[in-house]
Amino acid sequence: MMPAPDRFLQRHADGIHVIDTGFHRPRFDASYLVVEAGRGAFVDTGTNYSVPRLLEALAVAGLRPAQVDWVIATHVHLDHAGGVGLLMRHLPEARLLVHPRGAKHLIDPSHLMDSARAVYGDEEVMRSYGEVVGVDAQRVVSTHDGMTLDWVGRRLQFLDTPGHARHHHCVWDTRSRGFFTGDTFGLSYREFDSAKGPWLLPTTTPVQFEPEALRASVQRLLAFDPQWMYLTHFGLVGDVQRLGRDLLEQIDEIVALGRAAAHENQRHTRLKEDLSRVYLRRVREHGCLLDDAAVLELLEMDIELNAQGLACWLDRPQRHH
């Protein structure tokens, strides 16, 4: 039985609705429904299992499926775009906007599925994501850096933002002066909010972490002086310039610890231990009141994936020293 909409749907100004997709745990993974002049657009979708919530949110917003014009994937990692194909089967007028490097993977998701199975195994992939559905190529629009979309009078601009993934773009919403950031502007879980506001950390999820590119992407976003960042993980955050400084500092810090562990025999263990220490210190400095065990439990998956992502970067021949 699906929870009541007010349990997974938050409405904000400028027609922006935050939908908790239900992936992994509450307040972990968000999809956004933007409503403008009686039309709708989704940004990121969660997984196949998220689609009923997205359709319910659409109904709560007073829109029919035929009133959705766009589905936008910030990038094609399955927690962001795994539900795109299935959702679009319910949206007869919608087209997909996706980074040109990612378009082919949402038209034919076999490579995405094979990669996920290689990491997680068949059973876990089916449990977490289901069988990802491809999108008809005729319904796919590839973006380019700086592309602008005038959508029923609302201007959206797409910026190529590599660093987390090479198939990543962020979406500038002129109306709200906010970016839909996918994973480029890091992760900010609401459990870590304190009197100082939100806290966040960068994500180096394998396999395309590139720190120099990520720093440049973050700085490019900050140059717009945004009022809000709409994070997939999780929700909207303000105080953007402070968070941006913290994010850039952390990128430098984890790169340094990665280099220090590069030649360790037990490198993965060392990276996880070092990342854990960084995060515990930083959440304490932020004023988070959770105990260490609770912090590490919330960050367990991110610590594992960030250690893997740092290792992929360390092992890449062309990385810069």
Image (cartoon, rainbow, N blue to C red):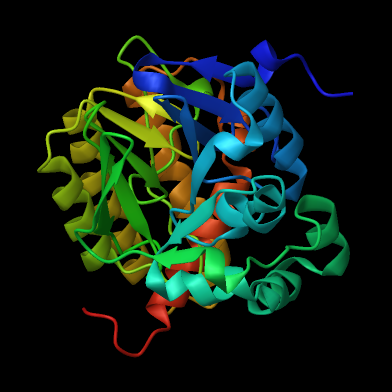
Q: Nearer the viewer, residue 23 or 265?
A: 23
Q: Nearer the viewer, residue 84 or 233?
A: 84
Q: Which quadrant of the figure has residue 199?
A: top left
Q: Nearer the viewer, residue 291 or 250?
A: 250
> Vertical placement of 22 versus 150: above or below?
above
User: Can residue 286 be seen?
Assistant: yes
Q: Is residue 26 left or right of residue 255?
A: right
Tally the numbered discs.
0
Residue at 9 percent of width and 43 percent of height: 223
User: Residue 299: where, in percent of width, then height?
Assistant: 57, 40
Q: Is residue 155 left or right of residue 142?
A: left
> Vertical placement of 280 versus 267: above or below?
above
Q: Quadrant of the N terminus?
A: top right
Q: Nearer the viewer, residue 279 or 146?
A: 146
> Vertical placement of 203 versus 299: above or below?
below
User: Residue 174: where, in percent of width, then height?
Assistant: 21, 34
Q: Is residue 255 left or right of residue 104?
A: left
Q: Which quadrant of the figure has residue 124?
A: bottom right
User: Residue 227: where, in percent of width, then height?
Assistant: 21, 25
User: Residue 255: where, in percent of width, then height?
Assistant: 30, 62
Residue at 22 percent of width and 48 percent of height: 248
> Vertical placement of 32 versus 49: above or below?
above
Residue at 27 percent of width and 66 percent of height: 144
Q: Which quadrant of the figure has residue 294?
A: top right
User: Can residue 262 be seen?
Assistant: no
Q: Quadrant of the C terminus?
A: bottom left
Residue at the outermost bottom position: 317
